[in-house]
Amino acid sequence: MYRLFLKRLFDIVISVFVMLLTSPLLVLIFIALMIQNNGEVFFYQRRPGLREKPFSLIKFKTMTDERDENGELLPDIERITLIGSWIREMSFDELPQLMNVLKGDMSLIGPRPLLYKYIPLYSDQQRRRHEVKPGITGWAQVNGRNSISWTKKFELDLYYVENLSFTLDMKILWLTVLKVLKREGINQSETRPMKPFNGNN
């Protein structure tokens, strides 16, 4: 009952509440990014959702589009702006995904939506993470986030898929608030973001 109906109601009610609660902050971030990014406030990227159906993920744009002499984007750590670094540190870059939740592409809680290029690298078990909607936060995020290995992260995602419940969602929601306040597990180190998944790590 919860998985089929009440979880969607839960997503809508909490998302609207959080958007209203953070609206002054969202306006300030919007204005700051408008100025810094020459009018480009949001970052959009195609990600796999429920049953690997594509959707457009929305986040605040925290990096520049600077490229090297070969036209390749510079490493993320070199493109993160000063404002963007603060927004990421506080996890505010994820707030626009509340719109993804309201549209039904995502849930508040579920496995994080990763890149399409990773799908061919998944094992059959890891691919089960797409049996539920992706989330803004999830069981892996409150148990290490980017500070744990990909293998462990997928194990935690599968645990969530197999044990999805209102009680577990409430626990994750509460732990997410604590993690954000404590700023825990955002990166593998202070200078090195999470490494890309290569099928083995």
Image (cartoon, helix red, strand yellow):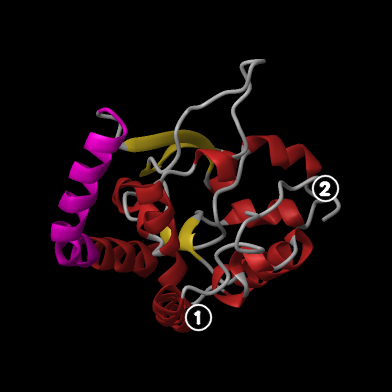
Q: Which mark is residue 168?
A: 1
Nearer mark to the viewer, of 1 and 2: 2
Q: Quadrant of the C terminus?
A: bottom right
Q: Earlier in the sequence, mark 1 or mark 2?
A: 1
Image quadrant where residue 142 sits:
bottom right
Residue 175 in picture, x, y percent from top left: 46, 81
Q: Which mark is residue 41?
A: none
Q: Do the numbered discs 1 and 2 sit on residues whose CB atoms are within 8 Å? A: no
Write the start and end of the magenta stretch as one range. Answer: 16-38
Residue 66 in picture, x, y percent from top left: 51, 27
Tell me which residue sits at (78%, 62%) in the image.
Answer: 151
Residue beneath disc 2: 199
Foreground residue, 80 or 144?
Answer: 80
Name the amino acid type tagged 1: Leu
Tell me which residue sits at (50%, 54%) in the image.
Answer: 133
Is residue 40 one of those drawn in magenta?
A: no
* Relative to 98, residue 31 above or below: above
Residue 69 in picture, x, y percent from top left: 64, 16
Tell me which residue sits at (77%, 38%) in the image.
Answer: 120
Residue 170 in picture, x, y percent from top left: 41, 80
Q: Residues within 10 Å of mark 1 (few under 14, many from 20)?
A: some
The answer to whether residue 4 of the structure is visible from this angle is yes
